Image (tube, rainbow, N blue to C red):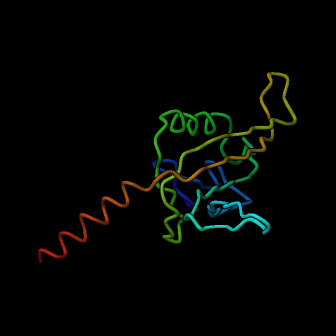
Amino acid sequence: MNISMMWGLFPFSVKTMPHEEYEKTTTFKYAENNRVGKSNSLQFMGKGNDEITLKGVLFPMITGGRHVVDLFKVQCELGIAFPLIESSGRIHGTFVCTSIVETCKYLESNNAPNRIDFTISFKRSGDDILDYASIITTQLVSLI
């Protein structure tokens, strides 16, 4: 199985949910301070949340179908932030799934779709687990 990305235990691949589009939005936080007779000043407060959106199409005869989407939703319903890792080894951090949009097209007489368009949205959660791992690693290295 050629995996393009992993979210927790769920692999994104041709046989599960292959995505055609990947969009990442990074925000930055600023506090706005009012000033008399001048435009407001902005103070940098730090990095905001990253949001990642994956879009793709499922053809149940070739790729995953409704059962794969349902399996993905089971992991989403746990409400836990999981690491999002590309097959290249790039770690994006820990993310939660905030939404899944499915559009079923070309329905058979039994209501089974021949095509499912999907959009999955992830939002970065605090990387406390990664931060704790970094602290522990630093402490262990200092002991050696």
**Picture coordinates of residue 24 (x, y %)?**
67, 62
Picture residue at 12% right of the left edge, 77% below the top: 144
Residue 93 in the figure: left or right of residue 28: left
Picture residue at 56% right of the left edge, 36% below the top: 71
**Picture coordinates of residue 79 (x, y %)?**
49, 36
Residue 40 in the figure: left or right of residue 109: left
Residue 40, quarter of picture: bottom right
**Picture coordinates of residue 15 (x, y %)?**
62, 50
Picture residue at 65% right of the left edge, 44% below the top: 64
Quarter of the figure with the N terminus: bottom right
- Asked whether 136 or 119 is in front, the reply is 136
Residue at the extreme left of the image, as rendered: 144
Residue 75 in the figure: left or right of residue 13: left
- Asked whether 3 or 9 is in front, the reply is 9
Residue 132 appears in the rendering:
yes
- Asked whether 38 or 74 is in front, the reply is 38
Residue at the extreme front of the image, as rendered: 36
Picture residue at 53% right of the left edge, 33% below the top: 77
Residue 116, quarter of picture: top right
